């Protein structure tokens, strides 16, 4: 049984890796570019992002600096942390869904395009359109 546990990545390492991937994708940065900035290969970045390899403290600090976020960003909502007071089960599912969507290719493309829209009225119309399309799809 010990061998099975050794093969499984630690849930915190997986979470930190997914947060690195999320932020890197939000910036439109490749694994290769992040690796170059750190002086390591893109394959090592892949291992960090999958949680296969743990990120050391100094490298974690360097990654957070390159990605422009505090180190705490990489640990937000990590497994094993005490639940935030006032959050219900539905809110946790919604937060997870939102994070999954924002991490997806479509979510990133939609977010990048949406923030480029300067006119608030046009942004509002896009939101209304997406809501209307979602209502048609669900009913």
Image: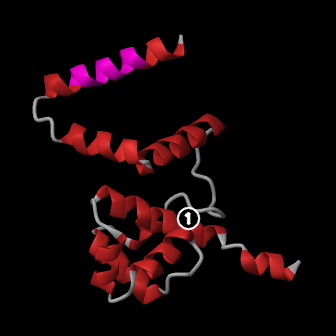
Q: Secondary structure at mark 1?
A: helix
The answer to whether one can see residue 2 in this image is: yes
Q: Is residue 87 visible?
A: no
For residue 69: magenta?
A: no
Q: Quadrant of residue 132?
A: top left
Decide: is 18 above or below 115.
Answer: below
Q: Position of residue 73 (x, y in %)?
A: 41, 64
Q: Say above or below: 62 vs 22.
A: below
User: Is residue 126 rendered to the left or right of residue 131?
Assistant: left
What residue lies at 31% left-to-right and 39% top-to-bottom?
Answer: 110
Q: State which region is magenta.
A: 124-133
Q: Nearer the viewer, residue 66 or 53?
A: 53
* Residue that appears at 45% across and 12% down: 136
Q: Which residue is mark 1?
A: 15
Queried whether the magenta region covers residue 132, the answer comes back as yes
**Is 73 situated left or right of 111 in this image?**
right
Q: Main secondary structure of the magenta part?
A: helix
Q: Nearer the viewer, residue 73 or 88?
A: 73
């Amino acid at each position: 049984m010990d061998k099975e546990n050794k093969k499984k990545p630690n849930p915190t390492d997986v979470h930190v890796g997914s947060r690195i991937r999320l932020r890197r994708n939000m910036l439109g940065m490749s694994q290769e570019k992040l690796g170059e900035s750190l002086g390591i290969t893109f394959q090592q970045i892949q291992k960090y992002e999958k949680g296969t390899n743990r990120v050391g403290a100094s490298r974690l600090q360097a990654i957070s600096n390159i990605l422009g976020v505090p180190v705490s960003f990489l640990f937000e909502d990590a497994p094993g942390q005490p639940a935030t007071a006032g959050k219900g089960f539905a809110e946790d599912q919604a937060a997870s869904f939102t994070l999954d969507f924002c991490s997806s290719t479509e979510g990133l493309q939609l977010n990048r395009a949406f923030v480029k829209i300067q006119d608030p009225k046009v942004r509002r119309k896009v939101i209304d359109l997406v809501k209307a399309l979602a209502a048609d799809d669900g009913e």
